[in-house]
Amino acid sequence: MKKVLTKNVKMQHISPIRGVSISNNGKYIATAGYDNTIKIWLTESFELLFSFEKHTDLVEKVSWSENDNWIASASADASAIIWNPQNGEILNVLKEHTDDLLSIRISEIHHLASTTSFDKTCIIWDLNKGIPIYTFKDHSHYVNDSILTKDGKYVFTVSNDGRVIKYNLDQGNKEWEVQTEKDLNSIALINDEKNLIVAGDDCRLIFLDILSGEIVNSKIIHDAPIKTVYVSHDETLIATGGYDRKIKVFKYPSLDLIHDIGASNKWENSIAISPDNRLLISGSFRSTFFAFDLKEATEIATGAVDTKGINSIDSFEQFLAYGGDDSILKVLDLKSNKWLFHEKVHDSIIQGIKFSPNGKYIATTSYDETVAVTNFETLELEKVFVGHRGVVNTVAWNKTSNIIITGGYDGIARVWDLNTGNILKEIISDGSVIKSISWNHYHNLIAIAHNSRVVYLYDGIEFCLKGVFKGHQALINQLAWSSDGSRLVTVSRDKTIMIHHIDRMRSEVFVDHAHRKSIKSVSWSRSDKYIITGSYDTNVKIWDSQSGNLVKTIDTHTLGVAALVTTVDDQLVTGGWDNRLTITDITEDSSLIGNLKTNTMTTLD
Protein backbone atom coordinates (compact mmCIF):
# COMPACT_ATOMS: atom_id res chain seq x y z
CA MET A 1 0.00 0.00 0.00
CA LYS A 2 1.30 3.43 -0.93
CA LYS A 3 1.55 5.73 2.08
CA VAL A 4 0.91 8.96 0.20
CA LEU A 5 -1.33 11.34 2.10
CA THR A 6 -2.97 14.04 0.04
CA LYS A 7 -5.33 15.37 2.71
CA ASN A 8 -5.24 15.65 6.47
CA VAL A 9 -8.86 16.11 7.47
CA LYS A 10 -10.03 17.63 10.76
CA MET A 11 -13.26 15.69 11.12
CA GLN A 12 -14.52 17.98 13.90
CA HIS A 13 -15.98 15.22 16.01
CA ILE A 14 -14.81 15.55 19.61
CA SER A 15 -15.09 11.85 20.41
CA PRO A 16 -14.94 8.46 18.66
CA ILE A 17 -16.53 8.13 15.22
CA ARG A 18 -19.00 5.26 15.40
CA GLY A 19 -20.59 5.20 11.96
CA VAL A 20 -19.77 6.19 8.38
CA SER A 21 -21.88 6.02 5.23
CA ILE A 22 -21.55 7.22 1.62
CA SER A 23 -24.63 8.41 -0.24
CA ASN A 24 -25.81 6.27 -3.13
CA ASN A 25 -24.93 9.00 -5.62
CA GLY A 26 -21.43 9.10 -4.16
CA LYS A 27 -21.45 12.84 -3.48
CA TYR A 28 -21.70 12.87 0.31
CA ILE A 29 -20.22 11.20 3.38
CA ALA A 30 -22.07 10.98 6.68
CA THR A 31 -20.28 10.37 9.97
CA ALA A 32 -21.74 9.67 13.41
CA GLY A 33 -19.95 10.15 16.69
CA TYR A 34 -19.77 9.76 20.45
CA ASP A 35 -20.26 13.56 20.56
CA ASN A 36 -23.98 12.97 19.77
CA THR A 37 -23.72 14.50 16.28
CA ILE A 38 -24.17 13.51 12.64
CA LYS A 39 -22.03 15.37 10.12
CA ILE A 40 -22.38 15.58 6.33
CA TRP A 41 -19.27 16.08 4.16
CA LEU A 42 -18.54 16.54 0.47
CA THR A 43 -16.85 13.38 -0.80
CA GLU A 44 -14.64 15.19 -3.27
CA SER A 45 -13.15 17.74 -0.89
CA PHE A 46 -14.07 16.40 2.60
CA GLU A 47 -15.57 19.83 3.28
CA LEU A 48 -18.07 19.95 6.13
CA LEU A 49 -21.58 20.89 4.99
CA PHE A 50 -23.85 20.26 7.99
CA SER A 51 -23.75 19.16 11.59
CA PHE A 52 -26.96 17.73 13.09
CA GLU A 53 -27.10 17.84 16.88
CA LYS A 54 -30.51 16.73 18.17
CA HIS A 55 -29.50 13.44 19.80
CA THR A 56 -28.82 13.52 23.54
CA ASP A 57 -26.37 10.62 23.56
CA LEU A 58 -23.78 9.03 21.29
CA VAL A 59 -24.79 8.19 17.72
CA GLU A 60 -23.98 4.58 16.91
CA LYS A 61 -24.86 4.27 13.19
CA VAL A 62 -25.87 6.40 10.24
CA SER A 63 -27.50 5.22 6.99
CA TRP A 64 -28.69 6.72 3.69
CA SER A 65 -31.95 5.79 1.97
CA GLU A 66 -31.97 4.46 -1.61
CA ASN A 67 -32.69 7.85 -3.22
CA ASP A 68 -30.53 9.87 -0.80
CA ASN A 69 -33.50 11.98 0.28
CA TRP A 70 -33.32 10.65 3.83
CA ILE A 71 -30.57 9.90 6.26
CA ALA A 72 -31.16 7.93 9.45
CA SER A 73 -29.27 7.83 12.73
CA ALA A 74 -29.40 5.35 15.62
CA SER A 75 -28.40 6.60 19.06
CA ALA A 76 -27.67 5.49 22.60
CA ASP A 77 -30.46 7.82 23.69
CA ALA A 78 -32.78 4.93 22.64
CA SER A 79 -34.10 6.82 19.63
CA ALA A 80 -33.62 6.92 15.89
CA ILE A 81 -34.05 10.05 13.80
CA ILE A 82 -34.87 10.35 10.09
CA TRP A 83 -33.36 13.57 8.68
CA ASN A 84 -33.45 15.62 5.51
CA PRO A 85 -29.72 15.60 4.68
CA GLN A 86 -29.96 18.88 2.76
CA ASN A 87 -30.96 21.03 5.70
CA GLY A 88 -31.10 18.90 8.86
CA GLU A 89 -34.89 18.98 9.10
CA ILE A 90 -36.18 16.16 11.30
CA LEU A 91 -38.69 14.05 9.38
CA ASN A 92 -39.32 11.37 12.01
CA VAL A 93 -38.26 10.52 15.55
CA LEU A 94 -38.57 6.82 16.36
CA LYS A 95 -38.92 6.06 20.07
CA GLU A 96 -39.95 2.64 21.26
CA HIS A 97 -36.76 0.86 22.33
CA THR A 98 -35.93 0.73 26.03
CA ASP A 99 -32.13 0.79 25.64
CA ASP A 100 -29.32 2.02 23.38
CA LEU A 101 -29.82 1.52 19.63
CA LEU A 102 -27.11 -0.36 17.78
CA SER A 103 -28.16 -0.07 14.12
CA ILE A 104 -30.69 1.34 11.70
CA ARG A 105 -31.57 0.44 8.09
CA ILE A 106 -34.12 2.41 6.08
CA SER A 107 -36.08 1.98 2.85
CA GLU A 108 -37.37 5.23 1.37
CA ILE A 109 -39.17 3.27 -1.35
CA HIS A 110 -41.20 1.16 1.09
CA HIS A 111 -41.25 3.74 3.92
CA LEU A 112 -39.77 1.17 6.30
CA ALA A 113 -37.01 1.16 8.89
CA SER A 114 -35.49 -1.58 11.01
CA THR A 115 -33.73 -0.75 14.27
CA THR A 116 -31.84 -2.99 16.69
CA SER A 117 -30.93 -2.42 20.29
CA PHE A 118 -29.34 -3.50 23.53
CA ASP A 119 -32.90 -4.30 24.64
CA LYS A 120 -32.63 -7.55 22.57
CA THR A 121 -35.27 -6.51 20.04
CA CYS A 122 -35.55 -5.56 16.40
CA ILE A 123 -38.35 -3.11 15.59
CA ILE A 124 -39.84 -2.59 12.13
CA TRP A 125 -41.23 0.92 11.61
CA ASP A 126 -43.87 2.44 9.34
CA LEU A 127 -42.17 5.72 8.39
CA ASN A 128 -45.37 7.24 7.01
CA LYS A 129 -46.89 7.11 10.48
CA GLY A 130 -43.71 6.98 12.57
CA ILE A 131 -44.98 3.96 14.51
CA PRO A 132 -43.79 0.38 15.05
CA ILE A 133 -45.28 -2.35 12.88
CA TYR A 134 -43.54 -5.30 14.55
CA THR A 135 -41.33 -5.77 17.58
CA PHE A 136 -39.35 -9.01 17.28
CA LYS A 137 -38.14 -10.43 20.61
CA ASP A 138 -36.62 -13.78 19.67
CA HIS A 139 -32.99 -12.99 20.47
CA SER A 140 -31.66 -13.65 23.96
CA HIS A 141 -28.91 -11.00 23.78
CA TYR A 142 -28.18 -7.70 22.07
CA VAL A 143 -29.27 -7.44 18.45
CA ASN A 144 -26.23 -5.89 16.79
CA ASP A 145 -27.41 -5.42 13.21
CA SER A 146 -30.24 -6.00 10.76
CA ILE A 147 -30.82 -5.66 7.03
CA LEU A 148 -33.97 -5.22 4.92
CA THR A 149 -34.41 -6.81 1.51
CA LYS A 150 -34.98 -4.42 -1.39
CA ASP A 151 -38.58 -5.57 -1.84
CA GLY A 152 -39.36 -4.76 1.78
CA LYS A 153 -40.61 -8.28 2.50
CA TYR A 154 -37.91 -9.63 4.81
CA VAL A 155 -35.53 -8.53 7.54
CA PHE A 156 -32.53 -10.46 8.84
CA THR A 157 -30.97 -9.92 12.28
CA VAL A 158 -27.75 -10.94 14.04
CA SER A 159 -27.04 -10.95 17.76
CA ASN A 160 -24.59 -11.60 20.56
CA ASP A 161 -26.45 -14.87 21.06
CA GLY A 162 -24.76 -16.11 17.86
CA ARG A 163 -28.04 -16.46 15.97
CA VAL A 164 -29.14 -15.25 12.54
CA ILE A 165 -32.93 -14.87 12.22
CA LYS A 166 -35.06 -14.29 9.12
CA TYR A 167 -38.43 -12.57 9.54
CA ASN A 168 -41.27 -12.36 7.03
CA LEU A 169 -42.66 -8.81 7.11
CA ASP A 170 -45.85 -9.69 5.25
CA GLN A 171 -46.82 -12.17 7.94
CA GLY A 172 -44.86 -10.75 10.88
CA ASN A 173 -43.32 -14.07 11.83
CA LYS A 174 -39.97 -15.83 12.01
CA GLU A 175 -39.18 -18.07 9.01
CA TRP A 176 -35.92 -19.59 10.21
CA GLU A 177 -32.98 -19.14 12.52
CA VAL A 178 -29.39 -20.40 12.37
CA GLN A 179 -27.20 -20.85 15.43
CA THR A 180 -23.48 -20.10 15.01
CA GLU A 181 -20.70 -20.63 17.51
CA LYS A 182 -19.96 -17.06 18.64
CA ASP A 183 -21.34 -13.52 18.80
CA LEU A 184 -22.37 -12.01 15.46
CA ASN A 185 -21.69 -8.31 14.87
CA SER A 186 -22.55 -7.41 11.27
CA ILE A 187 -24.69 -8.51 8.32
CA ALA A 188 -24.94 -7.87 4.55
CA LEU A 189 -26.80 -9.18 1.48
CA ILE A 190 -25.01 -10.31 -1.67
CA ASN A 191 -25.47 -12.26 -4.92
CA ASP A 192 -28.62 -10.36 -5.90
CA GLU A 193 -29.99 -11.05 -2.42
CA LYS A 194 -29.70 -14.80 -2.79
CA ASN A 195 -27.10 -14.99 -0.04
CA LEU A 196 -26.55 -13.45 3.34
CA ILE A 197 -23.14 -12.66 4.86
CA VAL A 198 -22.72 -12.60 8.63
CA ALA A 199 -19.53 -11.90 10.57
CA GLY A 200 -18.52 -11.82 14.21
CA ASP A 201 -16.24 -13.08 16.94
CA ASP A 202 -15.17 -16.30 15.22
CA CYS A 203 -13.09 -14.25 12.72
CA ARG A 204 -14.88 -15.65 9.67
CA LEU A 205 -17.30 -14.66 6.95
CA ILE A 206 -20.30 -16.99 6.89
CA PHE A 207 -22.47 -17.19 3.74
CA LEU A 208 -26.05 -18.42 4.05
CA ASP A 209 -28.80 -19.21 1.57
CA ILE A 210 -31.57 -16.70 2.38
CA LEU A 211 -34.36 -19.13 1.47
CA SER A 212 -33.29 -22.02 3.66
CA GLY A 213 -30.72 -20.53 6.05
CA GLU A 214 -28.26 -23.25 5.02
CA ILE A 215 -24.60 -22.29 5.41
CA VAL A 216 -23.12 -22.49 1.92
CA ASN A 217 -19.60 -21.21 2.67
CA SER A 218 -17.43 -19.87 5.47
CA LYS A 219 -13.88 -18.60 5.62
CA ILE A 220 -11.60 -17.28 8.37
CA ILE A 221 -10.31 -13.90 7.19
CA HIS A 222 -9.10 -12.03 10.28
CA ASP A 223 -6.89 -12.89 13.25
CA ALA A 224 -9.39 -11.36 15.67
CA PRO A 225 -13.17 -10.80 15.80
CA ILE A 226 -14.76 -9.03 12.83
CA LYS A 227 -16.58 -5.83 13.75
CA THR A 228 -18.13 -4.86 10.42
CA VAL A 229 -18.77 -6.17 6.88
CA TYR A 230 -19.75 -4.14 3.80
CA VAL A 231 -20.68 -5.18 0.24
CA SER A 232 -20.01 -2.78 -2.65
CA HIS A 233 -22.93 -1.55 -4.77
CA ASP A 234 -22.04 -3.81 -7.72
CA GLU A 235 -21.38 -6.74 -5.33
CA THR A 236 -17.88 -7.35 -6.65
CA LEU A 237 -16.13 -6.34 -3.40
CA ILE A 238 -16.51 -7.27 0.25
CA ALA A 239 -14.81 -5.09 2.87
CA THR A 240 -14.33 -6.10 6.50
CA GLY A 241 -12.96 -4.41 9.60
CA GLY A 242 -11.60 -6.41 12.52
CA TYR A 243 -10.34 -6.12 16.07
CA ASP A 244 -6.93 -7.00 14.61
CA ARG A 245 -6.87 -3.32 13.49
CA LYS A 246 -7.09 -4.18 9.80
CA ILE A 247 -9.45 -3.48 6.94
CA LYS A 248 -9.52 -6.20 4.30
CA VAL A 249 -11.04 -6.04 0.84
CA PHE A 250 -11.91 -9.23 -1.08
CA LYS A 251 -13.09 -9.96 -4.61
CA TYR A 252 -16.44 -11.65 -4.83
CA PRO A 253 -17.18 -14.48 -5.48
CA SER A 254 -13.58 -15.76 -5.42
CA LEU A 255 -12.84 -14.21 -1.98
CA ASP A 256 -9.32 -13.40 -3.17
CA LEU A 257 -7.73 -10.80 -0.91
CA ILE A 258 -6.90 -7.65 -2.87
CA HIS A 259 -6.24 -5.12 -0.08
CA ASP A 260 -4.95 -5.68 3.45
CA ILE A 261 -4.97 -2.26 5.09
CA GLY A 262 -3.61 -1.44 8.53
CA ALA A 263 -5.84 1.62 8.55
CA SER A 264 -5.47 3.36 11.88
CA ASN A 265 -4.10 1.02 14.54
CA LYS A 266 -7.60 1.06 16.01
CA TRP A 267 -10.48 -1.24 15.29
CA GLU A 268 -12.95 -0.07 12.68
CA ASN A 269 -16.57 0.53 13.70
CA SER A 270 -17.96 1.13 10.23
CA ILE A 271 -16.91 0.86 6.58
CA ALA A 272 -18.40 2.14 3.32
CA ILE A 273 -17.37 1.96 -0.36
CA SER A 274 -18.37 4.58 -2.94
CA PRO A 275 -20.66 3.49 -5.82
CA ASP A 276 -17.77 3.64 -8.33
CA ASN A 277 -15.65 1.31 -6.14
CA ARG A 278 -12.88 3.89 -5.89
CA LEU A 279 -13.22 5.24 -2.37
CA LEU A 280 -13.28 3.24 0.86
CA ILE A 281 -13.89 5.11 4.10
CA SER A 282 -13.93 3.97 7.69
CA GLY A 283 -14.51 5.38 11.15
CA SER A 284 -12.66 3.90 14.07
CA PHE A 285 -13.02 3.77 17.81
CA ARG A 286 -10.41 6.45 18.43
CA SER A 287 -12.11 9.12 16.32
CA THR A 288 -9.98 8.46 13.27
CA PHE A 289 -11.43 8.95 9.81
CA PHE A 290 -9.67 7.05 7.04
CA ALA A 291 -10.09 7.24 3.26
CA PHE A 292 -8.42 4.88 0.81
CA ASP A 293 -8.29 4.88 -3.00
CA LEU A 294 -9.05 1.27 -3.99
CA LYS A 295 -7.90 1.80 -7.58
CA GLU A 296 -4.52 3.26 -6.70
CA ALA A 297 -4.08 1.39 -3.40
CA THR A 298 -3.24 4.69 -1.73
CA GLU A 299 -4.33 6.52 1.39
CA ILE A 300 -5.96 9.74 0.25
CA ALA A 301 -7.12 11.22 3.55
CA THR A 302 -6.96 10.73 7.27
CA GLY A 303 -8.50 12.72 10.03
CA ALA A 304 -8.59 12.49 13.76
CA VAL A 305 -9.98 14.32 16.69
CA ASP A 306 -7.18 15.99 18.58
CA THR A 307 -7.54 14.05 21.81
CA LYS A 308 -5.13 11.91 23.80
CA GLY A 309 -7.38 9.95 26.07
CA ILE A 310 -6.23 8.08 29.18
CA ASN A 311 -7.00 4.37 29.11
CA SER A 312 -5.33 2.94 32.20
CA ILE A 313 -4.05 4.04 35.62
CA ASP A 314 -2.27 2.24 38.46
CA SER A 315 -0.53 3.31 41.67
CA PHE A 316 2.18 2.06 44.02
CA GLU A 317 2.85 3.87 47.28
CA GLN A 318 2.90 7.56 46.30
CA PHE A 319 3.59 6.87 42.63
CA LEU A 320 1.00 7.06 39.86
CA ALA A 321 1.44 5.52 36.41
CA TYR A 322 -0.90 6.10 33.50
CA GLY A 323 -1.02 5.85 29.73
CA GLY A 324 -3.31 6.13 26.76
CA ASP A 325 -3.66 7.19 23.16
CA ASP A 326 -0.25 8.88 22.84
CA SER A 327 1.63 5.62 23.60
CA ILE A 328 3.60 7.32 26.39
CA LEU A 329 4.04 5.86 29.87
CA LYS A 330 3.91 8.64 32.47
CA VAL A 331 4.81 8.28 36.14
CA LEU A 332 4.02 10.99 38.71
CA ASP A 333 5.19 11.30 42.32
CA LEU A 334 2.00 12.44 44.05
CA LYS A 335 3.82 13.71 47.16
CA SER A 336 6.31 15.93 45.38
CA ASN A 337 4.06 16.49 42.36
CA LYS A 338 7.03 15.77 40.10
CA TRP A 339 7.13 13.73 36.90
CA LEU A 340 9.54 10.81 37.16
CA PHE A 341 9.05 9.16 33.79
CA HIS A 342 7.65 10.27 30.45
CA GLU A 343 8.69 7.94 27.63
CA LYS A 344 7.12 6.29 24.62
CA VAL A 345 7.19 2.56 25.38
CA HIS A 346 4.87 1.33 22.61
CA ASP A 347 4.24 2.00 18.94
CA SER A 348 0.52 2.47 19.50
CA ILE A 349 -2.15 3.11 22.15
CA ILE A 350 -1.41 1.95 25.71
CA GLN A 351 -4.39 -0.08 26.90
CA GLY A 352 -3.35 -1.53 30.27
CA ILE A 353 -0.92 -0.67 33.10
CA LYS A 354 0.04 -2.54 36.27
CA PHE A 355 2.79 -2.04 38.88
CA SER A 356 4.39 -5.24 40.13
CA PRO A 357 3.57 -5.95 43.81
CA ASN A 358 7.17 -5.18 44.83
CA GLY A 359 7.05 -1.86 42.96
CA LYS A 360 10.10 -2.68 40.87
CA TYR A 361 8.37 -2.95 37.49
CA ILE A 362 5.55 -1.42 35.47
CA ALA A 363 3.92 -3.62 32.84
CA THR A 364 2.01 -2.03 29.96
CA THR A 365 -0.11 -3.52 27.19
CA SER A 366 -0.87 -1.99 23.83
CA TYR A 367 -2.66 -1.93 20.51
CA ASP A 368 0.76 -2.77 19.01
CA GLU A 369 0.21 -6.37 20.19
CA THR A 370 3.09 -6.27 22.69
CA VAL A 371 3.59 -6.21 26.44
CA ALA A 372 6.36 -3.93 27.75
CA VAL A 373 7.96 -4.14 31.19
CA THR A 374 9.71 -0.99 32.44
CA ASN A 375 12.14 -1.23 35.35
CA PHE A 376 10.90 1.45 37.76
CA GLU A 377 14.19 1.48 39.67
CA THR A 378 16.37 2.19 36.62
CA LEU A 379 13.61 3.83 34.54
CA GLU A 380 14.65 1.73 31.57
CA LEU A 381 12.75 -0.70 29.38
CA GLU A 382 13.39 -4.16 30.79
CA LYS A 383 11.62 -6.49 28.34
CA VAL A 384 9.10 -6.59 25.51
CA PHE A 385 6.92 -9.69 25.21
CA VAL A 386 5.70 -10.60 21.72
CA GLY A 387 3.16 -13.32 21.01
CA HIS A 388 -0.35 -11.92 21.04
CA ARG A 389 -2.31 -11.44 17.80
CA GLY A 390 -4.29 -8.24 18.08
CA VAL A 391 -4.71 -5.66 20.82
CA VAL A 392 -3.46 -6.64 24.30
CA ASN A 393 -5.98 -5.24 26.77
CA THR A 394 -4.88 -6.22 30.24
CA VAL A 395 -2.05 -7.43 32.47
CA ALA A 396 -1.74 -8.80 36.01
CA TRP A 397 1.22 -9.83 38.23
CA ASN A 398 1.69 -12.75 40.56
CA LYS A 399 2.52 -12.02 44.21
CA THR A 400 6.28 -12.51 43.84
CA SER A 401 6.54 -10.17 40.83
CA ASN A 402 8.22 -12.70 38.54
CA ILE A 403 5.24 -13.79 36.43
CA ILE A 404 2.68 -11.81 34.47
CA ILE A 405 -0.51 -12.85 32.71
CA THR A 406 -1.89 -10.92 29.74
CA GLY A 407 -4.96 -11.07 27.54
CA GLY A 408 -6.57 -9.33 24.61
CA TYR A 409 -8.35 -9.64 21.31
CA ASP A 410 -6.99 -13.04 20.31
CA GLY A 411 -8.85 -14.59 23.27
CA ILE A 412 -5.76 -16.28 24.74
CA ALA A 413 -4.44 -15.51 28.24
CA ARG A 414 -0.67 -15.89 28.18
CA VAL A 415 1.43 -16.50 31.29
CA TRP A 416 4.97 -15.12 30.96
CA ASP A 417 8.17 -15.68 32.94
CA LEU A 418 9.66 -12.23 33.56
CA ASN A 419 13.25 -13.47 33.78
CA THR A 420 13.33 -15.58 30.61
CA GLY A 421 10.55 -13.97 28.61
CA ASN A 422 9.15 -17.43 27.89
CA ILE A 423 5.46 -18.29 27.76
CA LEU A 424 4.73 -20.67 30.64
CA LYS A 425 1.09 -21.31 29.78
CA GLU A 426 -1.58 -20.39 27.26
CA ILE A 427 -5.14 -20.38 28.60
CA ILE A 428 -8.05 -20.51 26.16
CA SER A 429 -11.27 -20.18 28.14
CA ASP A 430 -13.79 -19.71 25.34
CA GLY A 431 -11.80 -17.90 22.66
CA SER A 432 -13.65 -14.58 22.92
CA VAL A 433 -11.91 -11.26 23.53
CA ILE A 434 -10.35 -10.93 27.00
CA LYS A 435 -11.20 -7.57 28.56
CA SER A 436 -9.71 -7.73 32.05
CA ILE A 437 -7.51 -9.94 34.23
CA SER A 438 -6.90 -9.63 37.98
CA TRP A 439 -4.68 -11.77 40.23
CA ASN A 440 -5.95 -12.52 43.75
CA HIS A 441 -2.76 -12.75 45.82
CA TYR A 442 -4.49 -13.91 49.00
CA HIS A 443 -5.99 -17.04 47.49
CA ASN A 444 -3.68 -17.25 44.46
CA LEU A 445 -6.57 -17.11 42.02
CA ILE A 446 -6.76 -15.45 38.62
CA ALA A 447 -9.99 -13.93 37.32
CA ILE A 448 -10.32 -13.52 33.55
CA ALA A 449 -13.24 -11.59 32.05
CA HIS A 450 -14.31 -12.26 28.47
CA ASN A 451 -16.58 -10.66 25.90
CA SER A 452 -18.79 -13.71 26.42
CA ARG A 453 -20.09 -12.06 29.63
CA VAL A 454 -18.37 -14.73 31.73
CA VAL A 455 -15.58 -14.60 34.33
CA TYR A 456 -13.34 -17.65 34.49
CA LEU A 457 -11.47 -18.40 37.70
CA TYR A 458 -8.09 -20.21 37.56
CA ASP A 459 -5.62 -21.23 40.23
CA GLY A 460 -2.31 -19.37 40.09
CA ILE A 461 -0.03 -22.43 40.24
CA GLU A 462 -1.16 -24.99 37.67
CA PHE A 463 -3.55 -22.51 35.97
CA CYS A 464 -6.39 -25.01 36.14
CA LEU A 465 -10.01 -23.88 35.90
CA LYS A 466 -11.58 -23.55 39.34
CA GLY A 467 -14.96 -22.06 38.54
CA VAL A 468 -17.08 -19.72 36.45
CA PHE A 469 -19.00 -16.58 37.40
CA LYS A 470 -22.01 -15.59 35.30
CA GLY A 471 -24.80 -13.04 35.43
CA HIS A 472 -23.94 -10.07 33.23
CA GLN A 473 -26.03 -9.49 30.11
CA ALA A 474 -23.24 -7.81 28.13
CA LEU A 475 -19.48 -7.82 27.88
CA ILE A 476 -17.58 -7.22 31.13
CA ASN A 477 -15.28 -4.19 30.91
CA GLN A 478 -13.29 -4.56 34.13
CA LEU A 479 -12.98 -6.55 37.35
CA ALA A 480 -11.25 -6.00 40.69
CA TRP A 481 -10.63 -8.04 43.84
CA SER A 482 -11.38 -6.74 47.32
CA SER A 483 -8.33 -6.26 49.54
CA ASP A 484 -9.00 -9.51 51.45
CA GLY A 485 -9.52 -11.44 48.22
CA SER A 486 -12.97 -12.70 49.21
CA ARG A 487 -15.03 -10.72 46.69
CA LEU A 488 -14.69 -9.88 43.03
CA VAL A 489 -16.49 -6.87 41.56
CA THR A 490 -17.28 -6.69 37.85
CA VAL A 491 -18.72 -3.89 35.71
CA SER A 492 -20.26 -4.23 32.32
CA ARG A 493 -21.72 -2.68 29.25
CA ASP A 494 -25.10 -3.71 30.70
CA LYS A 495 -24.65 -0.83 33.24
CA THR A 496 -24.73 -3.31 36.12
CA ILE A 497 -22.29 -3.84 38.99
CA MET A 498 -22.00 -7.43 40.22
CA ILE A 499 -20.29 -8.95 43.25
CA HIS A 500 -18.95 -12.51 43.12
CA HIS A 501 -18.11 -14.38 46.35
CA ILE A 502 -15.46 -17.09 46.24
CA ASP A 503 -16.55 -18.81 49.45
CA ARG A 504 -19.52 -20.52 47.83
CA MET A 505 -18.92 -19.42 44.24
CA ARG A 506 -22.06 -17.30 44.15
CA SER A 507 -22.81 -14.12 42.23
CA GLU A 508 -25.26 -11.31 42.89
CA VAL A 509 -26.30 -8.06 41.29
CA PHE A 510 -24.86 -5.27 43.44
CA VAL A 511 -26.39 -2.28 41.61
CA ASP A 512 -28.59 -2.53 38.52
CA HIS A 513 -28.48 0.38 36.04
CA ALA A 514 -25.76 2.03 38.10
CA HIS A 515 -24.91 4.47 35.27
CA ARG A 516 -26.68 5.86 32.21
CA LYS A 517 -24.11 4.28 29.90
CA SER A 518 -21.68 1.39 29.85
CA ILE A 519 -19.53 1.15 33.00
CA LYS A 520 -15.88 1.18 31.93
CA SER A 521 -13.84 1.08 35.15
CA VAL A 522 -14.06 -0.07 38.77
CA SER A 523 -11.96 -0.06 41.94
CA TRP A 524 -12.31 -0.73 45.65
CA SER A 525 -11.26 1.83 48.24
CA ARG A 526 -8.28 0.68 50.28
CA SER A 527 -10.42 -0.46 53.24
CA ASP A 528 -13.07 -2.06 50.95
CA LYS A 529 -15.64 0.34 52.39
CA TYR A 530 -16.47 1.74 48.96
CA ILE A 531 -16.73 0.57 45.38
CA ILE A 532 -15.96 3.26 42.81
CA THR A 533 -17.13 3.11 39.19
CA GLY A 534 -16.45 5.21 36.09
CA SER A 535 -18.63 5.29 32.99
CA TYR A 536 -18.99 6.44 29.41
CA ASP A 537 -21.59 8.84 30.84
CA THR A 538 -18.61 10.91 32.19
CA ASN A 539 -19.56 10.30 35.83
CA VAL A 540 -17.63 8.67 38.66
CA LYS A 541 -19.81 7.16 41.38
CA ILE A 542 -18.88 6.03 44.89
CA TRP A 543 -20.99 3.25 46.39
CA ASP A 544 -21.24 1.82 49.90
CA SER A 545 -19.88 -1.71 49.43
CA GLN A 546 -22.26 -3.24 51.98
CA SER A 547 -25.60 -1.61 51.19
CA GLY A 548 -25.09 -0.66 47.55
CA ASN A 549 -26.27 2.87 48.32
CA LEU A 550 -24.89 5.69 46.23
CA VAL A 551 -22.63 7.85 48.39
CA LYS A 552 -21.37 10.46 45.92
CA THR A 553 -21.33 11.33 42.23
CA ILE A 554 -18.28 13.12 40.84
CA ASP A 555 -18.82 14.89 37.52
CA THR A 556 -15.52 16.46 36.48
CA HIS A 557 -14.85 14.77 33.14
CA THR A 558 -16.23 15.87 29.78
CA LEU A 559 -15.78 12.49 28.08
CA GLY A 560 -15.95 8.88 29.26
CA VAL A 561 -14.07 7.79 32.39
CA ALA A 562 -11.85 4.97 31.20
CA ALA A 563 -9.67 4.35 34.26
CA LEU A 564 -9.54 4.89 38.01
CA VAL A 565 -7.53 3.78 41.03
CA THR A 566 -7.37 4.51 44.75
CA THR A 567 -3.93 5.29 46.14
CA VAL A 568 -2.41 4.27 49.46
CA ASP A 569 -3.42 7.67 50.90
CA ASP A 570 -7.07 7.18 49.88
CA GLN A 571 -6.88 9.51 46.95
CA LEU A 572 -9.11 8.59 44.06
CA VAL A 573 -7.46 9.18 40.69
CA THR A 574 -9.61 9.08 37.56
CA GLY A 575 -8.64 9.42 33.92
CA GLY A 576 -10.80 9.90 30.86
CA TRP A 577 -10.89 10.35 27.13
CA ASP A 578 -10.77 14.11 27.78
CA ASN A 579 -7.08 13.58 28.69
CA ARG A 580 -7.57 14.85 32.22
CA LEU A 581 -6.63 13.40 35.57
CA THR A 582 -8.93 14.07 38.49
CA ILE A 583 -7.50 13.53 41.97
CA THR A 584 -10.05 13.42 44.79
CA ASP A 585 -9.45 12.96 48.52
CA ILE A 586 -11.85 10.38 49.94
CA THR A 587 -11.64 10.53 53.73
CA GLU A 588 -13.32 7.36 54.92
CA ASP A 589 -13.78 8.34 58.56
CA SER A 590 -16.90 10.34 57.75
CA SER A 591 -20.34 8.91 57.11
CA LEU A 592 -20.64 10.36 53.62
CA ILE A 593 -16.95 10.88 52.84
CA GLY A 594 -17.40 14.50 53.83
CA ASN A 595 -16.70 17.27 51.38
CA LEU A 596 -14.67 15.84 48.55
CA LYS A 597 -11.75 17.98 47.49
CA THR A 598 -11.12 17.51 43.81
CA ASN A 599 -8.22 18.70 41.71
CA THR A 600 -8.55 18.35 37.95
CA MET A 601 -5.56 18.85 35.71
CA THR A 602 -4.69 18.44 32.06
CA THR A 603 -2.07 15.76 31.72
CA LEU A 604 1.54 16.22 30.73
CA ASP A 605 1.95 16.14 26.95
Image (tube, rainbow, N blue to C red):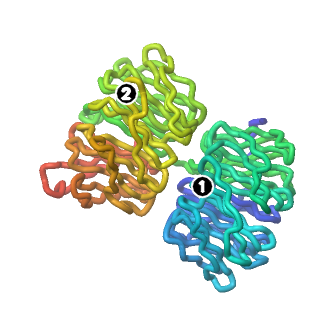
Residue 81: image location, x then y, percent: 61, 74
Q: Nearer the viewer, residue 472 or 109?
A: 472
Mark 1: amino acid: Ile
Left or right: 445 in relation to 141: left
Find residue 246 and report its image quarter.
Answer: top right
Q: Secondary structure at mark 2?
A: loop
Q: Which comes before the other along the chain, label 1 or label 2?
A: 1
Q: Tell me: 243 left or right of 340.
A: right
User: Residue 459 lies in what quarter of the image?
Assistant: top left
Q: Which residue is mark 2?
A: 460
From where the camera sits, is residue 580 visible? Answer: no
Residue 17: mark: 1
Q: Residues within 10 Å of mark 2 (few under 14, many from 20)?
A: some
Q: Residue furthest bottom?
A: 129
In this view of the protein, can residue 398 be seen by the observer? yes
Query: In the image, which is nearer the foreground, mark 1 or mark 2?
Result: 2
